[in-house]
Amino acid sequence: MKSRKIISLLATIAMLSSMAGCGDSSKSDSSSAADSSSVSSSSAESSSAADSSGSAQPDFDPSKTDEKTPDLEGYNLLWSDEFNGKKLDESIWSYDPHEPGWTNNELQEYTTSTDNVFIREGKLVLKGIKTQKNGADYYTSGKIKSQNKKDFLYGKICVKAKTPEGQGLWPAIWMMPTDESKYGQWPKCGEIDIMEVLGNDVKTAYGTVHYGEPHGEQQGTVKLESGSFADSFHEYSVEWEPGEIRWYIDGKEYLKVNDWFTAEKGQDDKPYPAPFDQTFFMQLNLAVGGDWPGNPDASTNFDKAEFEVDYVRVYQKPSYDTNVKKPEQKFREATADGNFIYNGDFSKAEDLNDDTDWKFLLFNEGAGSAEIKNNEIVIKSTAEGTEEYSVQLVQFDQPMIKGKKYRVTFDAYAEAERTMKVAVTAPNQGWIRYLPDTSLDLKTTKQSYKYDFEMKDRTDPTGRLEFNMGKCGSTATIHISNVRLEEIK
């Protein structure tokens, strides 16, 4: 949540039905849109700020907190909040006020107002509000944290929530270390993002981990085939153990990470599993605007800008084995002729939607298709999109070893003269560029291209070759063939 660049590496999983997660004996995990309609915008309007503030309401009853929290086999309940009271339980949560622009160039002011943070019908509501200040649009919203109240080391975290829909809205469930200075400021301290959903794409949810210097991050994505994360409640969970963190939505795993690191610049790595061997705390917020989602526009309905949370539950196993070792790095082997690109001659008409070998991706209003035939890949664009990566062809897991020299070669042409960009990037190392983004002019006849570079950064087995064809002033069809990435002397 602290720093965000959109990530085009998708570990896409079709979520066709809700599955058993952390358990809910009293509230169904498969809440339908009809089930949740009673607490949507209509009830929001009927619950006034005076009602949500707790005025003339009974105080929060902490005896109700665990009343409906189910047991979880193999775990003990560490703490939970079912949001059954009339106001926020401040023995668990603190308001976390911040001025606009505190991080990510976000627009909202996080306040302590019960207009922005309140309990309604057994659910926490974090509400974004659009107002006017000094003649300009001004936004307030809600953020809460459990720091110094419910900090913990290792466990299974389960949060059932429904996200808002609307351009510029950005709800998040995330964790930061109690002592951010133990291994150094962000990202060296570590961050676990349990869930983020952008309001302009509520069919997609992200789980991410940040760490290290240089900045490392790994991310998984779930894209719903039907429905959205805004029209029903879903359970977002993380299993955090020594040496491994796993992400789930509705009980289905979609991301597993065990190869993180952290270090001060120019120094050796801290002993593994640092930085994820210290206590962390929970955070819930609804951001407005910012670098990743972009700002609200005329289509954003702030009457419905509500991030609803049904429960937060944290479980722990009776014990954890902390004697863990970092997995050895595994490097892709080159083909017999020294090529790290698999199917570089496009001799196999493979599935371009999976993560094996080539993958074709569309983002941010990019539209088009790709097909392998006649020993080349043909990319047809119908909309160039708003970003260079809006139309993109990639291949993952390129082994980039510090001190080695590499060469990228390929043939390409377009059906009308146009440009595209090629790069070798680091999706797990803060998206730095090993081969910088390089623009090339495509002709209408096949041309050969060659780019040499030296790997000067930290060794990385997960480099990525990218061809970016968006936001270039053309949708002319592109043909690419004979792609190679090889080590040179």
Image: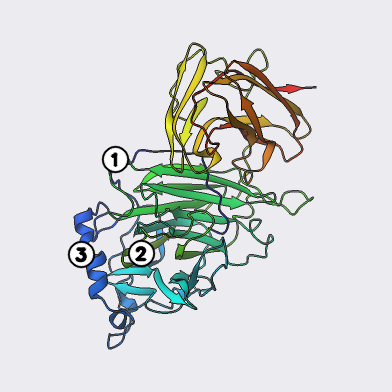
**Which of the pair 415/252 is nearer the observer?**
415
All told, the count of numbered labels is 3
**Residue, x 76% and y 52% (percent of image)?**
265
Query: In front: mark 2 or mark 1?
Result: 2
Amino acid type at circle 1 is: Leu
Residue 315 in the figure: left or right of residue 488: left
> Helix, strand, or loop for circle 2?
loop
* Real-space CA distance between mark 3 and mark 2, rounded to the nearest whole angstrom: 16 Å
Identify the image quadrant of the C terminus.
Answer: top right
* Real-space CA distance between mark 2 and mark 1, rounded to the nearest whole angstrom: 26 Å
Query: What residue is pinned by disc 2?
Result: 305
Q: Which quadrant of the view contains residue 438?
A: top right
**Which of the pair 470/370 is nearer the observer?**
470
Q: Earlier in the sequence, mark 3 or mark 2?
A: 3
Q: Are marks 3 and 2 in contact (CB under 8 Å)?
A: no
Query: What residue is pinned by disc 1?
Result: 16
**Residue, x 22% and y 67% (percent of image)?**
42
> Helix, strand, or loop for circle 1?
loop
Amino acid type at circle 3 is: Ser
- How far from the left and from the top, in percent, is residue 267? 78, 51
- How far from the left and from the top, in percent, is residue 101? 56, 67
Q: Earlier in the sequence, mark 2 or mark 1?
A: 1
Instruction: Note whether 174 is above or below 368 in the view shown.
Output: below
